[in-house]
Amino acid sequence: MIAVLGLVVGVVVGLVVRPVVPSGVEPYLPIAVVAALDAVFGGLRAMLDGIFDDKVFVVSFLSNVVVAALIVFLGDKLGVGAQLSTGVVVVLGIRIFSNAAAIRRHVFRA
Amino acid sequence: MSDQTPRTGRQRLVAGLWPPRLTRAQLTVAVLLFALGLGLAIQVRSTSDNDTLRGARQEDLVRILTELDNRSQRLEDEKRGLDQQRSQLESSSDQAAEARKQTQEKARELGVLAGTVAARGPGIVLTVRDPHGGVGSDSVLDTVEELRAAGAEAIQINGVRVVAGTYFTDGAGGVLIDGHRVAQPYVFKVIGNPPDLEPALNIPGGVVQTLEKEQATADVVRSQKIVVDALRPSEQPDYARSSQ
């Protein structure tokens, strides 16, 4: 419950406070958000499986974000940033879908 | 919650949501989800801003800039062409207007000569009274010739315009001008330079003296405002055409 409240508070604060993102970080924010979403879905699935561990969740969340941003950063340096970020989004999207399917089986038994 | 084993996923979800418990796991997840929500909100807001260039990567920006450059180049070329066209049209319409003005002025001048338009200006009025009928067509012709020689530009006699083709004949009881009977007295309205016209009539042995010899009286009155408004129909020649 507190976790869900944290998400809601984060969205509200982001909309109300309008924090300014430094322009160096700006290109990596969307990828980082998608990576974090993947980690969250993975955590939810683990919780439903009964194997949730907060340490694992923290590590997977942070590493997902960092690795995704790193890949895009590297892609930008190599001149293939657009293609690499598309690839990262595709991979993360597939993972999110498979996690969502597992969650759905738990919740709806279907 | 992971230690409460013999439960289905749905039960675990409900147990995690309610009642709210302040555990370490809940707090860490809440902090991370707070960060996720923050990033989500910022990203959604910056994307829904119309400023799509924010967050675009460098190569996209270069491509967009190149496209804009090409586009502005094309528009610049188009503008130059249209400017040129406009200046051409302006100068040609100016020339056409000037030519039309000159043609109209020419037409008015020729109309005065041909008697198809009315004329006004300084001149004289010559009134010839001939109670004895001694003035014939030859005297009238002499008078007209004398006036023309003195620079008369437009002449009418009793409502008949005198032009290049005018002829005078003697009829029963008076003079016919272009076949029209003209009643006495003969009133010549003449436009020209009055100081030229009046002496030309009054010179010794001139028109006035000749008319007086025929028992007629001739009065010459100068005026700054003579109106010659007798008109002739403009006739299109049947065969002759302008050679220009």
Image (spheres, helix red, strand yellow):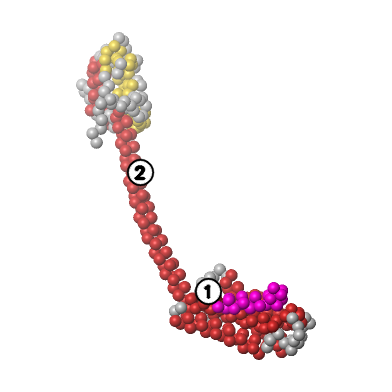
Q: Which mark is residue B54?
A: 1
Can residue B160 be seen by looking at this rendering? yes
Residue B17 visible in this rendered orientation of the protein: no
What are the residue bounds of the magenta stretch? A91-110
Residue B126 is a magenta residue: no
Q: Residues within 10 Å of mark 2 (few under 14, many from 20)?
A: few
B104 to the left or right of B12: left
Q: Are marks 1 and 2 in contact (CB under 8 Å)?
A: no
Which is the main secondary structure of the residues drawn in magenta? helix
Magenta stretch encompasses residue A100: yes
The image quarter in which residue B72 lies? bottom left
Who is closer to the viewer here, B108 or A19?
A19
Relative image position of residue B144 (x, y in whole percent): 26, 23
Name the quadrant of the C terminus of chain A: bottom right
**Residue drawn where x is 24% and y is 36% of the image:** B244
Give coordinates of residue B217: x percent, y percent.
Answer: 30, 17
Give the amino acid type for the residue marked by disc 2 in the picture: Ala
What residue is pinned by disc 2? B97
Q: In terms of depth relative to the viewer, which is nearer, A31 or B195?
A: A31
